[in-house]
Image: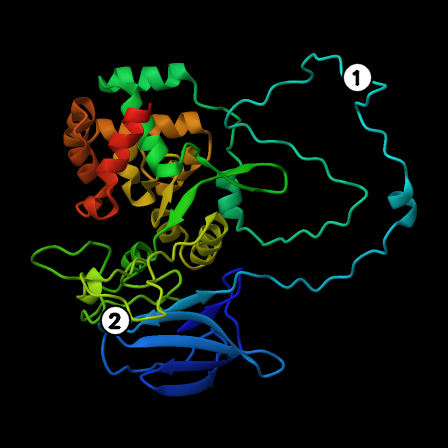
């Protein structure tokens, strides 16, 4: 088990009580936020994690099921404690009379003012001089900044959709459906650099970062060769000591993988179904991985409005390096749409499925053979019908 702060940093020296199989083990987290390994009586054993506060009172912070084989359980704190000095309250500012922009004595003229904000454009915010602001910063490697700096404020237009669809000989609403399912209609995160540069949406895959840095090489498992997985000889990455960003299996843990597809979860145990985290969490993972292996980190992410994996950079256009692919993903949503068209165009089976609106085949070639587990084909069809 591993405990992290909200910034994905290990929490050291935290006293925890692990409750399972009518046992209680008391231990402290080490410098990596790790608790000692435990062995449960069976695969459905409920494991609870309790922590002590300064008053030695216990609080339950998480629970899981033991599962089959070697399992990792990572807990992320939802809060951040900022140690900072605050300026004294400005009584004069608080007592100043506020004159509203419009009042019964001064009515608005009813005409629109300023420039309209287009979909996909960043909203500029003003800093309030009457309030104290705490800014949380984290150092970003220069290599990533150089990629992010290519951002242009260039939204996708209806002409863009139609032009790319005409090239593929397909209905543009099929491309829009993929756009909606993969990123809910936006290719850029709410996060940005201090100068206002927007960052593309990403999803970091720890099992891919493991595979790309594994001693057995980057090739995936096949019917003849199992190269990766817990317990596979030689399957080890030098970065497995941080399972939050590097581990033989992905973040999803389901009952089916535990061999209990129809079994009821034990009372009080919440199924651990998704540990990807939010946008901020995924960027913290990318930053940590990038410092260890830049190329593998970029390849282990899916990028932009259509969530195309960095590993697929060669089939997403005429790209010789993953850095060039990521640079274009950082540029604009219009460029991300072009990359999608290139990706579909290079896969003849996917292109045919898109032309035929064959949702199952689109889902299979775009999302992988396990697409039905997440009802991907149904989501695509429903998104298309709404459009």
Q: For mark 2, does the 10 Å Cα neighbourhood hold few (<14), some (14 to 19), or many (20 or more) residues?
A: many
Compare residues 202 and 25 and report the one nearer the observer: 25
Q: Which residue is mark 1?
A: 107
Image coordinates for residue 130, horizontal then vertical, percent: 81, 43
Identify residue for label 2.
67
How far apart are the alpha carbons under marks 1 and 2?
66 Å
Can the viewer see residue 366 in this picture? no
Residue 146 visible in rendering: yes
Colouring scheme, one of rainbow, by chain, secondary structure, one colour = rainbow
> How would you rate the neighbour count of disc 1 (Cα within 10 Å): few for under 14, some for 14-19, many for 20 or more?
few
Query: Quarter of the image containing the C terminus?
Result: top left
Residue displayed at 38% across by 58% down: 275
Query: Is 311 positioned to the left or the right of 26 in the image?
Result: left
User: For the point 77% across and 50% down, which residue is it?
Assistant: 132
Residue 186 image-quadrant placement: top left
Secondary structure beneath label 1: loop
Residue shown at 61% from the left, 36% from the top: 196
Residue lying at the far left in this picture: please name it: 224
């Amino acid at each position: 088990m591993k405990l992290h702060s909200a910034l994905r940093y290990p929490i050291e020296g935290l006293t925890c009580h692990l409750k399972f199989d009518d046992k209680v083990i008391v231990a402290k987290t080490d410098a990596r936020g790790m608790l000692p390994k435990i062995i449960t009586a069976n695969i459905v054993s409920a494991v609870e994690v309790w922590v002590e506060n300064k008053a030695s009172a216990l609080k339950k912070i998480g629970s899981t099921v033991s599962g089959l084989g070697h399992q990792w359980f990572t807990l992320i704190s939802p809060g951040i404690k900022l140690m900072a000095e605050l300026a004294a309250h400005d009584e004069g500012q608080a007592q100043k009379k506020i004159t509203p922009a419009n009042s019964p004595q001064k009515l608005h003229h009813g005409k629109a003012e300023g420039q309209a904000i287009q979909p996909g454009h960043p909203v500029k915010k003003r800093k309030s001089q009457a309030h104290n602001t705490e800014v949380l910063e984290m150092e970003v490697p220069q290599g990533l900044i150089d990629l992010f700096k290519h951002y242009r404020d260039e939204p996708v237009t209806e002409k863009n959709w139609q032009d790319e669809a005409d090239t593929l000989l397909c209905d543009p609403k099929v491309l829009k459906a993929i756009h909606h399912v993969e990123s809910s209609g936006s290719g850029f995160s709410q996060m940005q650099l201090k100068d206002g540069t927007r960052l593309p949406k990403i999803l970091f895959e720890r099992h891919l970062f493991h595979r790309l840095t594994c001693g057995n090489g980057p090739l995936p498992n096949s019917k003849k060769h199992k190269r990766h997985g817990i317990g596979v000889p030689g399957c080890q990455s030098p970065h497995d000591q941080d399972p939050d960003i590097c581990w033989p299996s992905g973040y999803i843990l389901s009952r089916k993988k535990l061999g209990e597809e129809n079994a009821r979860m034990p009372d009080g145990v919440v199924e651990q179904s998704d540990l990807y985290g939010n946008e901020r969490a995924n960027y913290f993972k990318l930053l940590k991985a990038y410092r260890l292996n830049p190329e593998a980190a970029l390849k282990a992410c899916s990028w932009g409005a259509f969530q195309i994996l960095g590993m697929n950079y060669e089939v997403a256009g005429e790209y010789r390096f993953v850095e060039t692919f990521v640079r274009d993903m950082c540029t604009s949503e219009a460029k991300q749409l072009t990359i999608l068209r290139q990706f579909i165009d290079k896969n003849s089976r996917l292109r045919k499925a898109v032309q035929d609106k064959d949702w199952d085949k689109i889902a299979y070639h775009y999302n992988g053979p396990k697409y039905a587990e997440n009802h991907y084909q149904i989501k695509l069809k429903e998104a298309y019908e709404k459009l």
